[in-house]
């Protein structure tokens, strides 16, 4: 399993990979799961968490980068098996009650067709068990856990309810706001708003993070994010006001 460690000792382990990535963040007594993967991944997820000397019932927090089925289908099961608090964007409130978040639009000819077909099928295949969130994220903020070095920022574009989690100002876990499957591109095959997506990339560039962990594929380095941001911002005439320093966001 891939593993990252920050200067202040936050440990991130990729506990699911393949169809959807899931990350476990450990610090002192905190066991934070970021995204759950699909229902079919339950055994693999439990086994991988067990192999770290932990277990599902030890999860203290579950943060969902967004509520597409492949990221949250196990949320209810994990909540039922632990005392974890679930953090999710307030925008997802109605979808969560309904157990279905509409699939995102395609960004290419092929993915537009796939998305259209998927939307016709809808909840039956792409739904999830409704669950009860504990904290709805309304604004960018610092979590009052551990030594206050976990931040959540809104990064819409792939979906309206997309958020990113900044760990120790070094590593950002970004869900589907970036796509890590291709070598030289991070542009996701599905996104509800390309303009918002580009602005969210700019917002992430304004943090001090250098490594970005996506919901699908491999880690993305800041150099590639910068290159892609410049390219797409020019192409779509969209920009996020980049500051003089990369330390603009949530540093005060
Ligand atoms: Zn998604």
Image: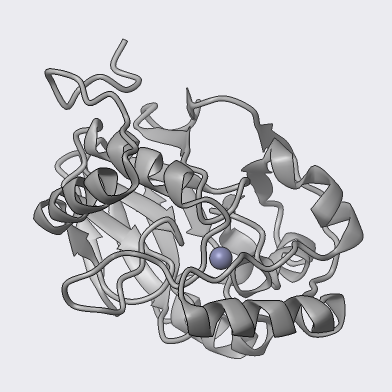
Q: Quadrant of ligand 1?
A: bottom right
Q: Nearer the viewer, residue 118 or 133?
A: 118
The location of residue 139, given as percent across then percent down, is: 57, 25
Residue at horizontal 81%, vertical 65%? 100
Residue at 86% x, 62% y: name it: 130
Looking at the rendered image, the quarter that the N terminus falls into is: bottom left
> Which residue: 61% across, 46% down?
160
Relative height, residue 109 to residue 220 (above, below)? below
Nearest the eye: 30 or 95: 95
Q: Position of residue 9 (x, y in %)?
A: 22, 46
Name the image quarter holding the C terminus. Answer: top left
In this rendering, the answer to whether 83 lies above or below 188 is above
**Residue 3 percent location from the top left of the image:** 24, 68
**Residue 185 in view:** yes
Given residues 227 and 204, the one toward you in this image is: 227
Q: Position of residue 248 (x, y in %)?
A: 25, 19
Taking the image as shown, residue 73 lies to the left or right of residue 16, namely right
Q: Is residue 63 above or below residue 249?
A: below
Q: How many marks?
A: 0
Q: Is residue 216 above or below residue 19?
A: above
Task: Confirm whether residue 10 shows in the render.
Answer: no
């Amino acid at each position: 399993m891939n593993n990252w460690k920050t200067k202040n000792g936050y440990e991130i382990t990729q506990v699911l990979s393949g169809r959807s990535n899931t990350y476990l963040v450990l610090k002192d007594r905190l066991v934070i799961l970021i995204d759950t993967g699909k229902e079919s991944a339950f055994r693999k997820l439990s086994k991988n968490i067990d192999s770290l000397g932990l277990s599902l019932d030890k999860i203290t927090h579950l943060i969902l980068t967004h509520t597409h089925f492949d990221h949250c289908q196990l949320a209810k099961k994990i909540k039922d098996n632990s005392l974890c608090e679930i953090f999710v964007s307030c925008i997802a409130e109605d979808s969560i009650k309904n157990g279905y978040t509409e699939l995102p639009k395609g960004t290419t000819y092929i993915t537009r067709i796939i998305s259209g077909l998927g939307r016709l099928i809808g909840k039956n295949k792409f739904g999830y068990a409704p669950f009860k969130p504990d904290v709805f994220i309304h604004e960018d903020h610092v979590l009052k856990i551990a030594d206050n070095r976990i931040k959540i920022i809104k990064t819409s574009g792939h979906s309206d309810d997309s958020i990113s989690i900044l760990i120790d100002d070094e590593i950002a876990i970004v869900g589907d706001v970036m796509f890590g499957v291709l070598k030289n591109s991070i542009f996701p095959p599905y996104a509800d708003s390309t303009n918002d997506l580009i602005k969210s990339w700019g917002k992430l560039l304004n943090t001090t993070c250098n490594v970005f962990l996506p919901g699908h594929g491999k880690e993305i380095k800041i150099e590639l994010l910068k290159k892609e941001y410049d390219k797409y911002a020019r192409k779509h005439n969209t920009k996020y006001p980049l500051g003089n320093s990369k330390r603009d966001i949530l540093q005060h």
